[in-house]
Image: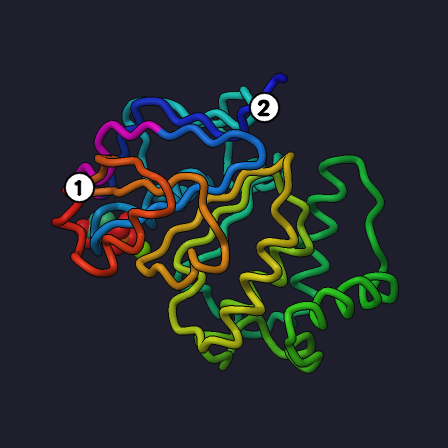
Amino acid sequence: MNIQNILNINNLHVNIDNSDIIKGLNLKINAGEIHAIMGKNGSGKSTLAKVIAGHPNYQITQGEINLKGENITKDEADIRAHKGIFLGFQYPIEIPGVNNIDFLRLSYNSIQKANSQNELDPLSFFDLINKKIKNINMDANFLSRNVNEGFSGGEKKKNEILQMSLLSSTLYILDEIDSGLDVDALRDIAHNINELQNNSKGLLLITHYQRLLDYVKPDYIHIMDKGRIIYTGNANIASQIEKYGYNSIL
Ligand code: ADP
Ligand code: MG
């Protein structure tokens, strides 16, 4: 059987404002796999997520990022999104003056268009998004509000998952999607993540806590420290970290 590679990062070095944040990182994710990255605050997890998604502020000084065998290191963020990278942010931004449903439809249509697929008019889109929003147990009034404006932490995270469920991506990266969630919201989110992940996609979860990994079972857990992956293990190491801390692994 030929296993398809989704993400392949080789010897990645990343610099911001003249300081090196990622220092020689390697990561391979194959289709159907779920990977988790854990690690202390400041170890570079969010930087890695943003760099994979193409955030313009970070400078890649060495190494490369490949998506399905294609080198995307120099692609802009929107091109990477068109090619199938989705990033759910640790701190989703508020966009005052922009209606959530318009934002979702524009995102959806821009990816459809880039892939020569049908774009949806507002009415057809409304049908689609209504199903998705029910699936994540969000009230429909979040569609008519401004993007994330005044949303609670948990509501912002659900809105990220709503976007994720809409944009059928190849690689999903979720940065601390579980932080600030009550247990019901965590279950809703985990249920949606499990439904979206399948054999043709890769999933990268960044988290501090085992509790998300009780619901979404990773194949591999990587420990990141000072800009590198210093340990890779299976799902069992999450409980060891929870009990004894990172130093028990390091
Ligand atoms: P994590 O998500 O693992 O907590 P981050 O990737 O957010 O870590 O941050 C890694 C390191 O990079 C931290 O020491 C942080 O202060 C630093 N860093 C991130 N963004 C910037 C920036 N814009 N300027 C300077 N340092 C930054
Ligand atoms: Mg972070």
Tell me: residue 44, above or below residue 213.
above
Front residue of this view, candidates 4 and 173:
4
Front residue of this view, candidates 186 and 25:
186
> Which span is picked out in magenta?
17-26
Tell me: residue 149, above or below residue 82.
below
Instruction: Bin the neighbour count of mark 1 within 10 Å (Cα to Cα): few under 14, some 14-19, many 20 and up.
Output: some
Residue corresponding to mark 1: 226
Question: If the image is split into quadrants, where does the C terminus sit?
Answer: top left
Answer left or right for 72 relative to 226.
Answer: right
Counting from the top left corner in percent of width and height, residue 4 is at 58, 23
Q: For the residues carrying marks 1 and 2, which lies nearer the camera in this image? A: 2
Counting from the top left corner in percent of width and height, residue 131 is at 77, 67
Residue at 43% of width from left, 38% of height from top? 52
Q: Is residue 225 magenta?
A: no
Residue corresponding to mark 2: 4
Counting from the top left corner in percent of width and height, residue 32 is at 58, 36
